[in-house]
Image: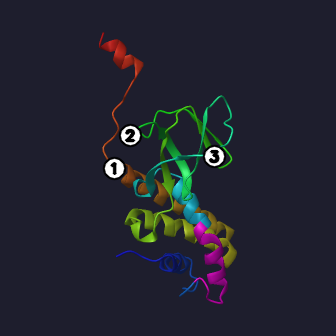
């Protein structure tokens, strides 16, 4: 069973002894804090690690603008981009040299496939990420709602531990990539 954004915030609020909310539009201080901090905290947590559930790939569209840094082509970035993981040409979304300038990607290739992180739908959050998000939200909500700095510090430590556990679980969700083009391996086979 997946939780909604409001339910996630309510669990975090309960963890610090505050009142639950039924909507971000409630006329309570808890709802105001949750509304202001939820999305920015979520996006920061998603961008902090290449979570498998947040990955997307897209072939970029070229734009008619002058390229910078010795590159020949300029591309528009996806509107849901949080962080670039890699870029490539053809079917591989890695191995391409590029530069970001503003909201454009500059590359030497006329075709770019981008592997990036996006903000996934809340229903797609796995349980281990929800736990890390709740812990982080509790830490973020604590100071404005309780003014307890030592309690907030303790909650940030707990959130850091939850984040480590979530990263570990997420890293076990796929096969490790094989080492490619490593000079010592090539020298060894000669």
Q: Quadrant of the C terminus?
A: top left
Q: Residues within 10 Å of mark 1 (few under 14, many from 20)?
A: few
Mostly what secondary structure, the magenta segment? helix
> Residue 179, relative to residue 144: is it above or below?
above
SS at mark 1?
A: loop
Residue 30: in magenta span = yes
Q: Quadrant of residue 129?
A: bottom left
State the mark number for residue 104. Answer: 3
The residue depicted at 66 percent of the width and 90 percent of the height is 27
Q: Do labels 2 and 3 touch, CB within 8 Å? A: no
Q: Within 10 Å of the Cα at label 2, are there few (<14), some (14-19), or many (20+) other Cα atoms? A: few
- The quadrant in which the N terminus is found is bottom left
Q: Secondary structure at mark 2?
A: loop
Disc 1 to disc 2, C-alpha distance:
24 Å
Q: Nearer the viewer, mark 1 or mark 2?
A: 2
Is the Cβ of the residue at disc 3 closer than 8 Å to that at disc 1? no
Residue 142, horizontal then vertical, whole percent: 63, 73
Magenta-drawn segment: 24-39
Which is more N-terminal, label 3 or label 2? 2
Give the residue pinned by disc 1.
172
Seen as rendered, the residue at the extreme front is 64
Q: Earlier in the sequence, mark 3 or mark 1?
A: 3
Compared with residue 110, is residue 145 higher up or lower down, i.e. above or below?
Answer: below
């Amino acid at each position: 069973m997946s939780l909604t954004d409001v339910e996630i915030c309510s669990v975090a609020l309960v963890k610090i002894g505050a009142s639950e909310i039924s909507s971000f539009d409630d006329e309570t201080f808890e709802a105001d804090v949750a509304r202001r901090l939820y999305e920015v905290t979520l996006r920061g947590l998603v961008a902090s690690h290449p979570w498998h559930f947040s990955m997307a790939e897209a072939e970029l569209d070229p734009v008619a603008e002058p390229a910078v840094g010795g590159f020949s082509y300029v591309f528009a970035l996806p509107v849901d981009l949080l962080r670039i993981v890699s870029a490539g040409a053809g079917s591989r979304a890695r191995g391409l040299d590029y530069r970001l300038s503003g909201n454009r990607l500059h590359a030497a290739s006329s075709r770019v496939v981008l592997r990036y992180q996006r903000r996934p739908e809340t229903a797609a959050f796995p349980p281990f990420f929800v736990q890390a998000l709740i812990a982080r939200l509790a830490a973020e909500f604590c100071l404005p709602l309780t003014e307890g700095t030592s309690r907030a510090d303790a909650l940030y430590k707990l959130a850091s531990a939850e984040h480590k556990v979530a990263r570990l679980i997420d890293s076990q969700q796929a096969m490790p990539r094989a080492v490619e083009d490593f000079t010592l391996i090539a020298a060894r086979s000669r």
